[in-house]
Image: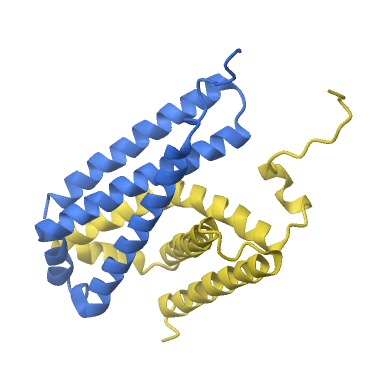
Amino acid sequence: MSSTRPQFRNIHVSQILSYRLPLAGVVSILHRLSGAFLFLIGIPLVLFVLDQSIASEMTHARLSAMLGHPLAKLVCLGVIWAFLHHAIAGIRYLILDLHIGTAKEQARSSARIVLILSLSMTAVVALRLFGAF
Amino acid sequence: MASRRIVTGAHYGLKDWLAQRITAVMLLVYTLVLLGAVSLGSAATYDQWAGLFAQGWFKIITLLAMLALCWHAWVGVRDIYMDYIKPTAIRLSLQVLTIIGLIAYLCWTVLILWKV
């Protein structure tokens, strides 16, 4: 095999910014990033919050106060975005697995829908968290 | 023919791919159940919220969801290791740490749930 043949491998994390990805590619790499973030931060945070919220009335009140801090709200918002993106993009992948919407144009518009839904839902949560309504 | 299978590879079959999707659906269903319970007002006060998790059936579906989550995370995180971490020693170490971590999360979930 000639060593000069180009090889197309997985995009390395260090190359993310230098690639001009199509929308479906953006959804894909964000799916991976959000998954990693949920694994590293999301699971322990959710378990901590679940523990404190149901352990006793005292821990529940203390947790409420803790989560009232703007920095805590920001971390929660990050986890919520990661969850929303991962879940909505995941639904798209499940549908694609059923061989629905695999044509180029359909796949592109479903990728756009994923980004619009996850970002707008995150925006609504952000407005709610920071007291807009 | 020499086997090209490597020690830190996937299970070379449908199983993991399918498990990732089945656990994904389980997590979506649990999310809807939880959202439904919260929107029906089951989280307004501490008593209601803790009362939700005090019920046996809710403990069980929560533990099932956590089991699905850990399995799902395992397949996904291992995919990431297989793409980016090439040396077998480092990849195997990360995989073992990940499995231990996920099992610890499961044990923690049991402790949390059976306190209420």
- Colour chain A is painted in: yellow
From the image, which quarter does the C terminus of chain A lie in?
Answer: bottom left
Along the viewing direction, whichever of B49 and B8 lies nearer the viewer: B8
Kindly tell me whether residue A59 is visible in this rendering: no
Q: Is residue A101 left or right of residue B23?
A: right
Instruction: State the residue lying farthest toward the bottom.
Output: A133
Along the viewing direction, whichever of A110 and B32 lies nearer the viewer: A110
From the image, which quarter does the N terminus of chain A lie in?
Answer: top right
Q: Is residue B52 left or right of residue A39?
A: left
Q: Residue B54 in the image: x percent, y percent?
A: 11, 60
User: Residue at image x 23%, y 50%?
Assistant: B63
User: Residue at image x 47%, y 43%?
Assistant: B17
User: Residue at image x 62%, y 53%?
Assistant: A29
Output the letter for the chain in blue. Answer: B
Residue B31, placed above or below residue A3: below
Q: Is residue B87 left or right of residue A97?
A: right
Q: Is residue B4 left or right of residue B15?
A: right
Along the viewing direction, whichever of B6 and A36 lies nearer the viewer: B6
Kindly tell me whether residue B6 is visible in this rendering: yes
Q: Residue B38 in the image: x percent, y percent?
A: 25, 73
